[in-house]
Amino acid sequence: MNLEQKIEAILFFKGEPMSRKKLSEFLAVGQNEMNEAIEKLKENLKDRGIVLQEKDNDITLGANKEISELIEKLQKEELNKELSKASLEVLSIVLYKNGVSRSLIDYIRGVNSSFTLRALSIRGLVEKSIDPTDNRRYIYKPTFELLSYMGVNSVEELPDYALVNNSIESASQNLEEELVKEAEEG
């Protein structure tokens, strides 16, 4: 598998932007080699349904602008259908934690939540922002629209807020302990 294929697979799996530097470090290649591979990938995707999008030093996969009407139609259909069980699980965690990393959501659920978070974001139910405690990662929060739709002014007004929030906080501590243990062993 060549470097362009690896980059494409990683971006597809992540479902969110990654910096060139992080990709370069993860794939253990130099920045020049990474930049060349990204340019080749851009060229390979040129006449396809997906394209490589760039903003600052971040790159991600996106839909080709020539099929934007099709994507818009699909997006409207997605917005009008009911939430899946996975979406409700993720949404509950985001609501009750009110600022949660994807890694914690994945830990609690036991599965990768990238696509679910992306779908919730597209629907305007969650928003992603840089974590104030670690600017290398993102946290997910409920949108004002979601709180308004639910008829609450703040997440503290949610049913059994303290109980559920404490459970999520406990899971967060367990994850941190596991990460520290792995770091010490590895």
Image (cartoon, rainbow, N blue to C red):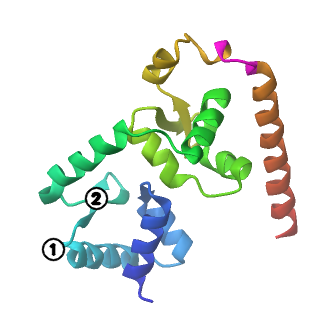
Q: Magenta stretch: residue 159 in it?
A: yes
The residue singled out by tag 2 in the image is: 53
The reply to whether the C-beta atoms of the residues labelled 1 and 2 are less than 8 Å apart is no
Give the overall secondary structure of the magenta segment.
loop
Determine whether, in the image, residue 135 is placed left or right of residue 44: right
- Residue lying at the far front in this picture: please name it: 82
Mark 1 or 2, nearer chain start: 1
Image coordinates for residue 67, horizontal then vertical, percent: 16, 58
Q: Residue at x 50, y 63 (%)?
A: 22
Q: Name the amino acid, label 2.
A: Gln
Q: Is label 1 in a helix, a strand or a loop?
A: loop
Whether 71 is drawn above or below 61: the answer is above
Q: Position of residue 49 (x, y in %)?
A: 22, 67
Residue at horizontal 79 percent and vertical 49 percent from the top: 175
- Residue 52 rendering spot, x and y as whole percentages: 28, 64
Label 2 element class? strand
Magenta region: 157-161
Q: What residue does disc 1 label?
A: 47
Can residue 133 be seen from the camera position used here?
A: no
